[in-house]
Image: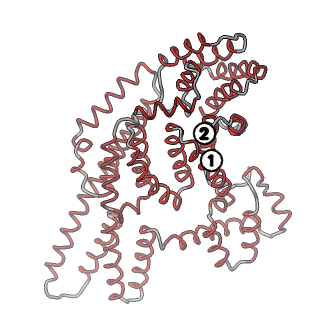
């Protein structure tokens, strides 16, 4: 049985402040030594528990390892209590029970009233229902006093309201689960079935009362699920030009309820991310530029993956507009951030960013730098993602621009085998490979360029499929103009 890497992955997930807080408060010397030793290990593939045991020579290693794991979790909980409404509430309820056990009932009631206000502000219905039940028990057990019956009735009415909202929330949870699982299943269907299934889901969004009217959602979390049910349908079918109004309403709702929104930061990020994508696809650039700093600032504090995706969004805009100077500045910023956040983000996210950086270099005419970025992607041999296929195709175009015709001929055969092994050679990929193979053998390519341009325009498009604009590149060849000039021309017409 292989040793668990849970402790290693937990320690590697900590940021600088979380590590500092833990080291400041840990008193066990052996646990501190083990923490420092694991923290010094670069990557997961370098983690060797046997070598670690030999180096540290610590007794009862499995016990110490478990103790350290639990200590790090406790430290994280304590560190984040100050900024997590959920953790604050849980701590307050624990303290309430301690005070009650000490018969410090007045202090306990003051603390419970404070917790209730926080639960109401953050619309934590589950905790709120628990607090109301505690209030009810307190009043029932209290000695006879004036207006006791009136107070009990008020608490019971409040309980009914909260339970009604909870029932409503549970209905939305069920609806969201149904919509998301159905959308996932349908999105993996054959092309013939997908169109009918897409219409079926969109009809469901319009015909179901709870999904068609946001006023049916009785609480903040229920309304989030209302919006997210719509987004999961749009995104599962890559309908990135649709749903702008839904995304706009989602973000406005978050802004209007910022205190509660910050308790659900992942949903807040989802709302902003989806609106930014719709702003790009519908050319609302001023709105995009206004929202991007908010998304980047929020994601930087919460999620490395979400934060890095903000770079992807900005690259998309800059490469589409041909804003070369800012794009190359962003490449430098990205390289620094990827180094700083090493091992903190999903590798596939990093590869898509490298692809966008490669496209920026290509547009700027720096084909050697573009090739270096593409090779980073291709060398990630353990990754099974479409980005590898994109990079392989794009590498051929870079070699074409570099006039590496011998290498181009060799790589074209290699890339063709890659797609043949995948058994997923699309019309676009087939057309590009055919052109690049013939381009090595002919001097006059004008006819080939036009033929390829026609084939690509007829091929089914997929918004998820390409980071590089092949059609604009072909137009630059047909019209004998720089690629950058064609991009800027197109952007000026929008």
| Location of residue 393 in the rendering, given as x and y in whole percent from the top left corner | 64, 26
The quadrant the C terminus occupies is top left
Residue at 29% x, 71% y is: 133
Please rate how many residues cluster around mark 1, counting C-alpha atoms within 10 Å: few if below 14, some from 14 to 19, many from 20. Answer: many
Q: Quadrant of residue 27?
A: bottom right
Q: Residue at x 51, y 32 (%)?
A: 487
Residue 360's tag is 2
Secondary structure under the numbered disc 2 in the rendered image: helix
Q: Which quadrant holds residue 422?
A: top right
Residue in the picture at 68% in, 14% down: 439
Q: Callout 2: few (<14), some (14-19), or many (20+) C-alpha neighbours within 10 Å?
A: many
Q: 159 or 123: nearer the eye?
A: 123
Mark 2 touching mark 1, by CB under 8 A? yes
Query: Where residue 69 appears, x then y in whole percent?
Result: 65, 65
* Closer to us: 309 or 29: 309
The residue beneath circle 1 is 331
Q: How was the colour assigned to the protein in this rendering?
A: secondary structure
């Amino acid at each position: 049985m292989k040793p668990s890497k849970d402790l290693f992955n937990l320690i590697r997930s900590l940021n600088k402040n979380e590590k500092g807080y833990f080291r400041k408060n840990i008193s066990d010397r052996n646990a501190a030594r083990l923490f420092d030793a694991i923290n010094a290990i670069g990557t997961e593939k370098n983690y060797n528990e046997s070598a670690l045991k030999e180096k540290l020579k610590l007794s009862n290693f499995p016990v110490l390892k478990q103790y350290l794991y639990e200590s790090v979790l406790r430290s994280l909980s304590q560190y984040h209590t100050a900024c997590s409404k959920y953790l604050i509430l849980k701590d307050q309820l624990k303290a309430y029970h301690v005070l009650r056990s000490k018969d410090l009932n007045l202090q306990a009631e003051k603390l419970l009233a404070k917790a209730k206000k926080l639960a109401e502000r953050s619309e934590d219905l589950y905790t709120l229902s628990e607090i109301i039940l505690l209030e009810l028990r307190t009043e029932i057990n209290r000695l006879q006093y004036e207006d006791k019956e009136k107070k009990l009735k008020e608490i019971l009415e409040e309980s009914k309201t909260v339970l009604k909202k909870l029932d409503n929330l549970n209905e939305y949870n069920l609806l969201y689960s149904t919509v998301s699982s159905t959308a996932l299943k349908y999105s993996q269907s054959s092309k013939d079935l997908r169109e009918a299934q897409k219409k079926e889901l969109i009809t469901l969004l319009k015909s179901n009362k709870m999904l068609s009217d946001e006023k049916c959602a009785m609480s903040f979390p229920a309304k989030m699920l209302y919006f997210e049910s719509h987004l999961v349908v749009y995104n599962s079918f890559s309908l990135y030009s649709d749903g702008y109004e839904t995304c706009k309403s989602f973000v406005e709702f978050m802004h209007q309820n910022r205190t509660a929104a910050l308790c659900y930061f992942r949903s807040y990020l989802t709302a902003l991310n989806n609106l930014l994508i719709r702003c790009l696809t519908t050319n609302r650039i001023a709105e995009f530029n206004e929202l991007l700093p908010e998304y980047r600032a929020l994601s930087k504090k919460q999620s490395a993956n979400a934060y890095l995706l903000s770079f992807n969004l900005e690259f998309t805009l800059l490469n589409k507009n041909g804003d070369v100077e800012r794009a190359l500045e962003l490449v430098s910023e990205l390289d620094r951030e990827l180094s700083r956040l090493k091992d903190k983000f999903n590798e596939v996210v990093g590869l898509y960013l490298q692809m966008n950086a490669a496209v920026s270099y290509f547009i700027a005419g720096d084909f050697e730098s573009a090739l270096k970025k593409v090779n980073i992607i291709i060398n990630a041999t353990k990754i099974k993602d479409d980005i590898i296929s994109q990079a392989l195709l794009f590498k051929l175009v870079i070699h074409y621009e570099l006039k590496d015709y011998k290498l181009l001929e060799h790589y074209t055969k290699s890339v063709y085998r890659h797609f043949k092994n995948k058994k997923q050679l699309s019309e676009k990929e087939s057309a590009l490979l055919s052109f690049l193979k013939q381009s090595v053998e002919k001097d006059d390519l004008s006819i080939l360029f036009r033929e390829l341009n026609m084939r690509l325009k007829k091929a089914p498009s997929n918004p998820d499929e390409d980071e590089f604009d092949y059609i604009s590149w072909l137009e630059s060849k047909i019209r004998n103009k720089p690629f950058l000039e064609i991009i800027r021309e197109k952007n000026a017409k929008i």
